[in-house]
Image: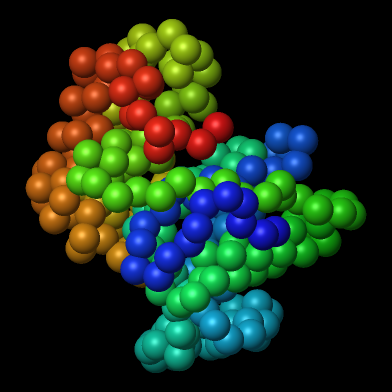
């Protein structure tokens, strides 16, 4: 699962899309989505990960009231945002280690595929090569924040990217309740807070209120998807 075209540099930010082969649905059940969350957190390390052992450790520590084992990780990337869709994953990450994004995506893709194939009696690759675009300016950061977190709109309004949003109020409420993205954590609702590093984007967006306002303004004023510019990866 090597990177293509875009040079990945330490300390720089990238919008990543990891799509399934043949648009296979990769999150069939809630258990699958939780496993995806677990994967983007636990596989973000330079060390080897044994998922069964990590899950056992976490269960023991949770039952005993002890601390989580997260401090032992040596992160490859900083995950700023994420969004799970039925057949793909969106991420905004900052590379911390040389070749860190490629290693991280290989671990996430391979690890989740092993789980998925075993569960659904499936063989072969689950994901295509990931795509990446370099995010450099504040405008791009705001656009990619909105775009990633607005992706779930297609679950209730399938044609929104082509035809615009029909019911802004319904869409806004839906996104606030959508569990499988980082949006709730950015607007002050604790969801998966340990997965993302949010300080940088919260400052760029103007605080938690700014995060919510940017998304809602885009929806309310029914802006064209073309206004996101070159940060879109479809």
Residue at 37% x, 21% y: name it: 225
Numbered circles on residues, count = 0
Where's residue 93, x and y in %?
41, 59
Q: Quadrant of the C terminus?
A: top right
Return the x and y of residue 147 as percentages of the image width and height: 37, 35
Residue 37 position (above or below residue 66) = above
Q: Percent position (x, y) of residue 66? A: 39, 91
**178 w.r.t. 223: above or below:** below
- Residue 55, placed above or below residue 6: below
Considering depth in this image, is 114 or 175 the residue closer to the camera? 114
- The residue at 58%/86% (across/down) is 47
Residue 89 in view here: no
- In this rendering, position of residue 22 left or right of residue 201: right
Nearest the eye: 222 or 57: 222
- Quadrant assignment, res 111: bottom right
Left or right: 231 in relation to 113: left
- State the image quarter where residue 144 is shown: top left
What residue is shown at x 36% (from left), y 62% (from top)?
A: 12
Residue depicted at 40% across the width and 70% down the height = 10
**Viewport quadrant of the N terminus:** bottom right
Colouring rule applied to residues: rainbow
Is residue 111 visible in the rendered image? The answer is: yes
Left or right: residue 174 versus residue 98 is left
């Amino acid at each position: 699962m090597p990177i293509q075209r875009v040079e990945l540099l330490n300390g720089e930010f990238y919008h990543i899309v990891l799509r399934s082969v043949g648009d296979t649905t990769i999150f069939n059940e809630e258990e699958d989505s939780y496993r995806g969350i677990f994967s983007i957190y636990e596989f973000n390390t330079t060390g080897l990960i044994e998922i069964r052992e990590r899950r056992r450790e976490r269960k023991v520590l949770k039952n005993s009231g002890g601390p989580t084992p997260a401090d032992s990780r040596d992160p490859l990337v900083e995950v700023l945002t994420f969004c799970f869709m039925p057949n793909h994953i969106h991420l905004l990450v900052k590379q911390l280690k040389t070749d860190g994004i490629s290693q991280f995506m290989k671990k996430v893709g391979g690890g989740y595929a092993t789980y998925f194939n075993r569960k659904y009696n499936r063989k072969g690759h689950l994901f295509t090569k990931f795509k990446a675009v370099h995010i450099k300016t504040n405008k791009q950061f705001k656009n990619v924040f909105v775009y990633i977190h607005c992706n779930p709109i297609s679950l209730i309004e399938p044609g929104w990217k082509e035809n615009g949003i029909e019911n802004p109020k319904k869409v806004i409420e839906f996104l606030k309740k959508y569990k499988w993205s980082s949006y709730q954590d950015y607007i002050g609702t604790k969801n998966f807070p340990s997965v993302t590093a949010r300080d940088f984007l919260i400052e760029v967006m103007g605080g938690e209120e700014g995060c919510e306002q940017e998304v809602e303004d885009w929806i309310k004023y029914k802006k064209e998807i073309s206004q996101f510019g070159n940060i879109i990866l479809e």
